[in-house]
């Protein structure tokens, strides 16, 4: 993170975060930024596994286990600026393993967390289904006891799942009692090699991101692989999303910061009508708008992460505000960056084009912007009602 933004969010950071921000920026520039954009989905999947090992070897997954949200945000910012694929690798390692950190038995923690942290095991978070996107409580995957025995039999389909096909385990949400709706959803850790779990195939995006569909056909899962009690899965899923939502917003800031950096450099070096673009006030207006949006987004991000790190029971409101604003702002900023670059910004080889293709997904995954707005309004209205301000 570069000044003046480091100063803007400094109030929310400890000294160790400032030091970490410098280290991850240096690591990203040396090890991540130079990675070529994968030529196709297969190459993207292979690169994701290599990035996993690299991040694990260098210890970058430790803040996930430690639930140091500000560190996770700083790491995602730096990775996203260098490579949106590297950011996705970090994001999924967090999303797939945090439920184990929060609710796993000692055995499950021992089996998976050291491997996750070292980059030897790739995590995945399998919630979305063909008929259950924003409306997660509608999920149709079932986990039923087999003839009264302790094992569960999983049946169903999960779609739009990051790391599908390359993950070592899936954190899966399934209904153990459909009559209870959301309260009947449970969460399981399912190793990728479990018989009955099948990778159907990739779902290819315009930006490198390993995505795909998996199915469960009579997939037997021991009761010991359940996270928390039966029926606690929905709450665990929401708590995980709640905690990590600010990090999605941080990734958006990373992409936006890179776009601003590229736009500033181009505005200073490119000459038209006899002078640098930077001297035209219409270009300056764009640069200023980008910077204002970015700083506002970062303030929301690090405010939410700081609240979480200092022990707030929930950061639902703060995280939803951060995600809604930062991801929408990042889209505007990257778009403005392309405009400042002109035609060169649209060349597939240019970093801005990759950002343009990558930033779009952030407004959709882990809760769309519309869902964040509903969360914010819901929190406001609940507080207003509790305060007795309804007429
Ligand atoms: C790159 C990428 C990676 C992903 N990775 C994962 C993953 O690893 N694991 C996983 O489980 N899922 C993953 N997803 C899925 C993602 O979480 C869903 O796409 C998201 O939750 C939205 O669901 P949907 O696509 O079914 O859209 P829908 O829920 O069908 O929504 C479509 C549109 O309707 C709007 N809408 C829906 N309900 C309302 C409402 N009540 N009020 C107003 N508007 C509404 C939405 O905001 C959206 O604009 C990923 C998606 C993408 C794009």
Image (cartoon, rainbow, N blue to C red):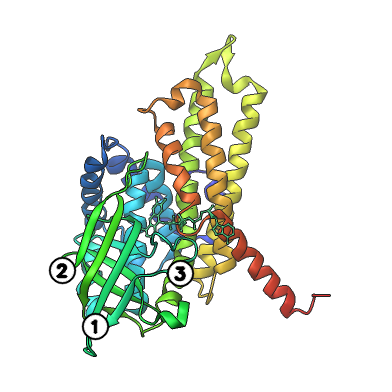
For residue 80, above or below residue 109: above
- Please state which of residues 151 and 266 is positioned toward the viewer in this rendering: 151
For residue 262, above or below residue 216: above
Q: Are marks 2 and 3 in contact (CB under 8 Å)?
A: no
As drawn, the label of residue 138 is 3
Residue wearing tag 2:
195
Q: Locate the C terminus and report the quarter of the image it occupies.
A: bottom right
Residue 94 figure quarter: bottom left
Measure the C-alpha gap from mark 2 to mark 1.
17 Å
Residue wearing tag 1:
224
Q: Nearer the viewer, mark 1 or mark 3?
A: 3
Q: Are marks 1 and 3 in contact (CB under 8 Å)?
A: no
Measure the C-alpha gap from mark 2 to mark 3.
26 Å
Q: Is residue 183 visible?
A: no
Instruction: Report x, y in % for residue 335.
Output: 53, 34
- Please state which of residues 269 and 130 is positioned toward the viewer in this rendering: 130
Instruction: Report x, y in % for residue 109.
Output: 26, 76
Q: Is residue 108 left or right of residue 307?
A: left
Q: Nearer the viewer, mark 2 or mark 1?
A: 2
Label 2: state its secondary structure.
Answer: loop
Q: Residues within 10 Å of mark 3 (few under 14, many from 20)?
A: some
- Residue that sits furthest to the bottom in the current view: 148
Q: Is residue 292 left or right of residue 34?
A: right
Q: Is residue 358 left or right of residue 322?
A: left
Q: Earlier in the sequence, mark 1 or mark 3?
A: 3
For residue 177, above or below residue 250: below
Instruction: Report x, y in % for residue 263.
Output: 51, 30
């Amino acid at each position: 993170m570069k000044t003046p933004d480091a100063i803007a969010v400094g109030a929310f950071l400890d000294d160790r975060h400032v030091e970490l921000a410098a280290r991850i920026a240096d690591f990203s520039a040396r090890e991540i930024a130079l990675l070529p954009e994968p030529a196709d989905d297969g190459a993207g999947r292979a690169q994701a596994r290599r990035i996993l090992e690299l991040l694990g070897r260098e210890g970058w997954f430790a803040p996930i286990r430690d639930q140091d949200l500000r560190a996770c945000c700083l790491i995602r910012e730096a990775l996203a600026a260098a490579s949106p694929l590297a950011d996705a690798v970090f994001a999924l390692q967090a999303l797939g393993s945090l439920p184990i950190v929060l609710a796993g038995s000692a055995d499950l923690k021992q089996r998976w967390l050291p491997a996750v942290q070292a980059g030897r095991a790739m995590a995945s978070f399998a919630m979305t289904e063909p008929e259950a996107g924003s409306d997660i409580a509608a999920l149709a995957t079932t986990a039923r006891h087999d003839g009264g025995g302790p094992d569960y039999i999983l049946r169903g389909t999960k779609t739009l799942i990051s790391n599908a096909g390359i993950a070592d385990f899936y954190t899966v949400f399934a209904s153990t009692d459909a009559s209870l709706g959301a309260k009947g959803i449970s969460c399981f850790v399912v190793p990728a090699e479990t018989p009955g779990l099948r990778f159907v195939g990739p779902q290819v995006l315009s930006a490198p991101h390993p995505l795909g569909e998996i199915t469960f056909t009579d997939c037997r899962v021991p009761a010991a692989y359940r996270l928390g009690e039966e029926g606690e899965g929905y709450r665990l899923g929401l708590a995980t999303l709640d905690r990590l939502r600010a990090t999605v917003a941080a990734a958006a800031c990373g992409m936006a910061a890179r776009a601003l950096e590229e736009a500033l450099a181009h505005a200073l070096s490119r000459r038209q009508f006899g002078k640098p673009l930077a001297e035209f006030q219409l270009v300056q207006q764009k640069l200023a708008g980008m910077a204002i949006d970015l700083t506002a987004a970062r303030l929301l991000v690090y405010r939410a992460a700081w609240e979480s790190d200092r022990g707030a029971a929930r950061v639902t409101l703060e995280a939803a505000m951060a995600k809604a604003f930062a991801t929408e702002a990042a889209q505007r900023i990257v778009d403005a960056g392309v405009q400042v670059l002109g035609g060169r910004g649209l060349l597939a080889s240019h970093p801005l084009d990759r950002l343009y293709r990558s930033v779009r997904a952030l407004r959709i995954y882990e809760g769309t912007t519309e869902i964040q707005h509903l969360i914010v309004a819901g929190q406001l209205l609940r507080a207003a009602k509790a305060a007795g301000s309804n007429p």
